[in-house]
Image (tube, helix red, strand yellow):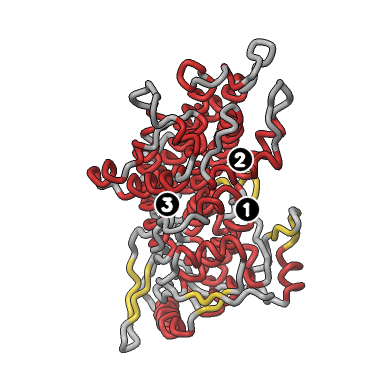
Amino acid sequence: MQMPALTLTPGRLSLADLQLIHDSAPELLLDPSAQAGVDASAAVVRRAAHGSEAVYGVNTGFGKLASTRIGEAALETLQLNLIRSHCVGVGEPLSPPVVRLMLALKAASLARGFSGVRRVVIDSLLAVHNAGLIPYVPRQGSVGASGDLAPLAHMSLALIGEGEMLQDGQRVPAAAALQRAGIAPLKLAAKEGLALINGTQTSTALALHALLTFEPVLEAALVIGALTVDAARGSDGPFDPRIHLLRGQPGQIDVAQYYRALLAGSEVRRSHLTGDDRVQDPYSLRCQPQVVGACLDQLRHAALVLVREANAVTDNPLVFAEADGSGQLVSGGNFHAEPVALAADACAVAIAEVGAIAERRIAMLIDSSVSRLPPFLSAEPGLNSGFMIAHVTAASLASENKSLAHPASVDSLPTSANQEDHVSMATFAARRLQPMIHNTAHILGIECLAAAQGLDFLRPLTSSPALEAVHALLRKRCAAMPTDRMIAPDIEAATALVRDGSLARILRSLPALPTLWIPA
C-alpha cells in the first residue's frame, strides 16, 4: 500500500513529521499557502540584484570578501562558484535518513519566505527527495557556523547536476541520476546558492537522527533495567510514586511509572517481601528513576530545541518583504548553530549516563557478594569465567563514551580570516552521538544477557508477564550459558533486540504509560 504524502507546512513541522521523513521517505508536498511569501521575498532579491547598492550575498563576495562588489553580469556565476568552492567535505557519506532530513528541512526553511529564493529551488529539493535520490555528502568539514557550509554545498552541487548521488552504496554522477529521474538540473539566480548552503540543516538533521535512533535504545534500557531488578531480587519500593512526586522532576516520575508497570505481577518480587535482610539496594538499582529520568528530561528538552530548529529560518541575509512590494535584506547570525550544539551535548551526556548506570548494574550482577547470585553468573565458577570478560567489554564501552561526552560546544576555532571568530562545532557535536548510541546499545545487550542468566538461577520463580516476555524473546536468539562458550555472537543478537525496537514494543504494549518524547 502506498504511503500517503506528507504536506510540509513551513514553520509547523512536528517531531512526528520529522520521524516519518527520517524513517519512511514519504512523498513531500509543499503547503500552497507558502507560495505568496516565497514569491514576495524572491522579488525583493531580484530588485536588489539590479540595484546600485551593495547587498551581501547578492552582489558582493562572501565572508571576509564581503566588501568585493560583483558586477550584475556575473551574479549567477557568483552563486555557482560559491557552491563549487564550498564542496570541501571529507570522510564517509552521511546516511540516507540524515540526507533526507537535510533536503526536507532546507525546503521547509526556504519556503517560509524569508530567504529570497524562487519556488523552483524548493521544488528541486522536494523533487530530489521524492525521487528517492540521495546526494553524496561527506560527513566532515563543518564547524557549525556560517551554516553547515560544506555538507550543504555537496547537497546543492548534486541539485545542479555537478555533484554525486549515493545509489546502492555507490557514488554515481548526479547529472545522470537527475536525468533518469526526469529532474532538470537547478540553475541558480542571485542569492540562491548562499541560501542553500547557509543554515543549520545538517547539524539539525544529525541531531534528530541521533534522537530518533536512541529512542528505542532508551526504552530498552528501561526494560532491561527492570529485568536486572528482578534478577538481583531488588525491591520495587524505590519506585513508589509518592517518592517521585515529592521531588517533582517529570522524567523521574515517568521512569518510576515505567518500572512499576514492568515489574507488576512478579513472583520473584513476592518471594522476598519477607525475610530479606537487605535494607536498601545498590544505587544502580534503586536510583534508576533519578538517573534515567534526568536523562529523559534532557532528551525531551533537546527534542523541543531541535523541532524549533527544524522549523527555523537560518540563512543570511534574511529578506523581509513588505505588503507594498518593497522590502529589506538584513544581515544577522541565525546560521550559528549554538542551540543545536548545546542540545547535542546534552544528548551526549544523557546517552553516556544511560550506558554508565547499565555498566554498573552488570558489575553488580556478577558480584556474588552484592547480587547473591553465583560468581560471574556461572554455575561452576573457576572452571568457567561466565560473564567476567563480557563485563570488561561493557566497561570499555562506558569509558569510551565518557571521552566522547566531552562537550563539543565549548570548543571554537576562528575561520575565514577571523571574520567568523566564534563557531559552534554543532555538526561534530551531533555526528559523534551515533558511536555513543552504538556503545550504549552494546552495554545494554550485555546487561540483557546477564540479567536473563541471573533470572535463570531463580527458577522456578517467574518474573512479571512483561519481563518474562523479554526473557523468552532473548532466549529465542540466545540460549542460556551453563558453561563457557563464545559469547560475542550473543552480544550482537541481544544488541539487535535493543536497537530494532523489539524490547521497546514490549514497553509500549503496557497500558496507560506516558509517551517517551514530548512532541513539539
Distance from the alpha carbon under mark 2 to that under mark 1: 33 Å
Residue located beneath label 2 in the image: 471
Q: Residue at x 43, y 54 (%)?
A: 516
Residue 129 visible to an observer of this rendering: yes
| First-in-chain label (3 vs 2) | 3
Q: Residue 290 carries which label?
A: none
Distance from the alpha carbon under mark 3 to that under mark 2: 47 Å
Specify whether 338 is left or right of 393. Answer: left
Disc 2 residue type?
His
Percent x, y for residue 357? 45, 32
Residue located beneath label 3 in the image: 145
Q: In this view, does 480 lie above or below 55?
A: above
Tell which of 85 and 110 is nearer to you.
110
Binning the other alpha carbons within 10 Å of mark 3 as few (below 14), some (14 to 19) or many (20 upward) gives: many
Residue 415 visible to an observer of this rendering: no
Binning the other alpha carbons within 10 Å of mark 1 as few (below 14), some (14 to 19) or many (20 upward) gives: some
Disc 3 residue type?
Ala
Between circles 2 and 1, the one closer to the viewer is 2
Tell which of 309 and 124 is nearer to you.
309
Residue located beneath label 1 in the image: 95
